[in-house]
Amino acid sequence: MRSMRLTSLAAGFFILSACPFNASAQLAISANDGKSTLVDGVLATLDTPSPDSVTLLDLSATPPKVIAEIAAPASVVGPPSSAAIAPDESFALVTAAMKIDPADPKKMAVDNRVSVIDLKASPPAVISTAEAGAGAAGVAISPDGKLALVANRSEGTVSVFTIAGKTLTAVNKLALGDAKSGPSAVIFTPDGKTALVTRDGDSKISVLTIDGSKVEAAKREIVAGIKPYPLDINSTGDIAVTANVGGGNGDADTMSLIDMKANPPRVVDTVTVGQSPEAAKLSPDGKYVAVTVMNGSNKAKSFPFYNDNGLVVVLAINGQKLTKVSEGKVGHWCQGVVWSKDGKTLVVQCMIERELQVLAFDGKEVKPVSAIKVKGGPAGIATAQK
């Protein structure tokens, strides 16, 4: 990997400016897990963990600018969609699927917390905590900002919350499959009437129907590939994408394109992207999708398909076809990815390096630019869905 100019952050939680952000900023949040690491490719608890945190960024700056760092529970367990920003950028939600076991600091225990972060406050801060289900992972906020869904990986459910201002109220839980179905990522369609939920436990994607605060599972279940995990949808609601993480045995895994105009929605194309795709994010114009690929970087060095770097792969979307455009090397055990509004900058989360790695994309090639150090392992990332 090419050398990167590092922008280091001082220790502790702090604010870099008197006001949280200016009106022209494009906000992003990175949820950072301070307790987790890999030991020979196996998830483990750090001997000296640091507090979990959330880093608030302005993606409109070049390079992206850190605005604040906020103490809040986070977890690398689950897809990197464990964070969501309201459409008006007034608040954010961050889930925590796992925590340090109170009875044994060397072990992890299932968590269920959802932190509500006021982004308009000075400084930004957690203002309340809601309880979802066991293993609270992927989270999404409806386009009108009045509903939130949380995928609960450890109990096979989705929690439904209404939102009034910045207050979450639990409505109910919706069971999807059995307790081992593994609801992972969730996303709303732009009209707010439908949602998709990946289930990596039984390799299905649930289609949910939404009427106000009433959320139900449609009879339709989409089958894209082995262990569908991340999700995204374009601004018009015509297409969605998911990555299939596979079995983790070194085989080349896949990315699928879903035709949302079809009745019912269906997979129309699937392409190979590499070992263990972790995140998938569509560019603002919907022409490209960026995929973070583990590439064996999260395995023990003795693993036959270990590589000393991960990848970010960019695919073009042409009608109902996916075509590879470029790929670039990133760090190890990398998680989420987001785009700047102009589609020229990508930010990738890399757990081992504890960095947000910044890359440039010119429509043909992706190139490393710089990196931003954070206090924990960056594990979940989001911009506002508009």
Image: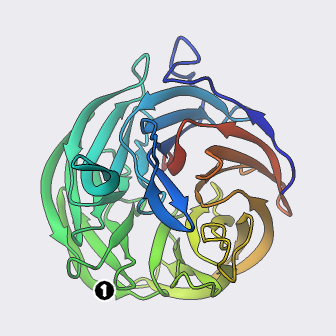
**Residue 115 located left or right of residue 365:** left
Q: Which residue is mark 1?
A: 220
The colour scheme applied to this rendered structure is rainbow
Q: Residue furthest top?
A: 18
**Residue 292 located left or right of residue 195:** right
Q: Is residue 288 above or below residue 103?
A: below
On the image, the x and y values in percent for residue 274 come to 68, 79
Question: How many numbered marks appear?
Answer: 1
Question: Would you say residue 308 is visible in this rendering?
Answer: yes
Question: Would you say residue 211 is visible in this rendering?
Answer: no
State the quadrant of the N terminus: bottom right
On the image, the x and y values in percent for residue 342 come to 71, 46
Q: Nearer the viewer, residue 23 or 367?
A: 367
Q: Which residue is painted at 38% across and 51% down in the image?
A: 143
Q: Is residue 310 above or below residue 260?
A: above
Q: Is residue 163 above or below residue 244?
A: above
On the image, the x and y values in percent for residue 61 come to 71, 31
Q: Which residue is painted at 12% across and 54% down in the image?
A: 171
Q: Nearer the viewer, residue 263 or 308?
A: 308
Q: Is residue 122 above or below residue 324?
A: above
On the image, the x and y values in percent for residue 141 come to 35, 50
Q: Which residue is painted at 73% across and 46% down in the image?
A: 358
- How many other residues sit within 10 Å of disc 1, few (<14), some (14-19) or many (≥20)? some
Q: Which residue is painted at 49% across and 43% down in the image?
A: 32
Question: For the residue marked with disc 1, what is the amino acid?
Answer: Arg
Q: Secondary structure at mark 1?
A: strand
Q: Nearer the viewer, residue 71 or 348?
A: 71
